[in-house]
Amino acid sequence: MKDGKCTGLMMVAKWLLALGGINWGLVGGFEWNLVEAIFGTWPWLVALIYILVGLSGVWLAVEMLKGCSKSCKK
């Protein structure tokens, strides 16, 4: 994130995390997996989506930690 603006990659990561959060809520609350309901006929695509959601979480966590360390130095 430069100058407080989201890059295209950051927006994709945020949307993937939103999808992951909604999916976990549906799994926990109703035992219904949205990702598998939509893409279940392609197991490789389901796995890819889960991998991308996980990588998005790691990347955004690192970006948040970078931002926190910059603001703590001021």
Image (cartoon, helix red, strand yellow):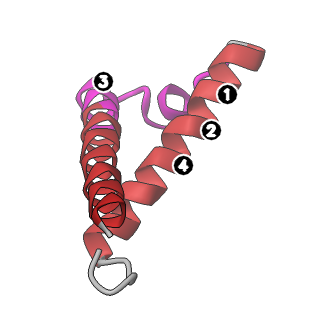
Magenta: main secondary structure: helix
Tell me: residue 43, above or below residue 17: above
Which of the two labelled residues, at mark 1 and mark 3, occupies the earlier sequence position?
1
Q: Which mark is residue 18?
A: 4
Tell me: residue 29, above or below residue 20: above
- Mark 2 vs 1: CB contact within 8 A: yes
Magenta part of the chain: 32-50
Which amino acid, by three-letter code, is at mark 4?
Answer: Ala
Query: Which quadrant of the rendered structure holds the C terminus?
Result: bottom left
Tell me: residue 28, above or below residue 70: above
Tell me: residue 40, above or below residue 5: above
Work out how far the residue at label 4 is from the one at label 3, CA to CA, in angstroms.
Answer: 21 Å
For the point 37% across and 77% down, the residue is 6
Work out how far the residue at label 4 is from the one at label 2, CA to CA, in angstroms.
Answer: 6 Å
- The residue nearer to you, when weighing 12 against 40, is 12
Residue 72 appears in which quarter of the rendering? bottom left
Work out how far the residue at label 2 is from the one at label 1, CA to CA, in angstroms.
Answer: 5 Å
Residue 26 location, x and y as percent? 69, 26
Work out how far the residue at label 1 is from the one at label 3, CA to CA, in angstroms.
Answer: 21 Å
Which of label 1 and label 3 is nearer to you?
1
Work out how far the residue at label 4 is from the one at label 1, CA to CA, in angstroms.
Answer: 11 Å
Which of the two labelled residues, at mark 4 and mark 3, occupies the earlier sequence position?
4
Which amino acid, by three-letter code, is at mark 3?
Answer: Pro
- Mark 4 vs 2: CB contact within 8 A: yes
Q: Residues within 10 Å of mark 1 (few under 14, many from 20)?
A: some
Q: Would you name the residue on which mark 1 appears? A: 25
User: Which type of secondary structure does the marked residue at label 3 adopt?
Assistant: helix
Q: Which mark is residue 22?
A: 2
Q: Would residue 33 be found to the left or right of residue 28 on screen?
A: left
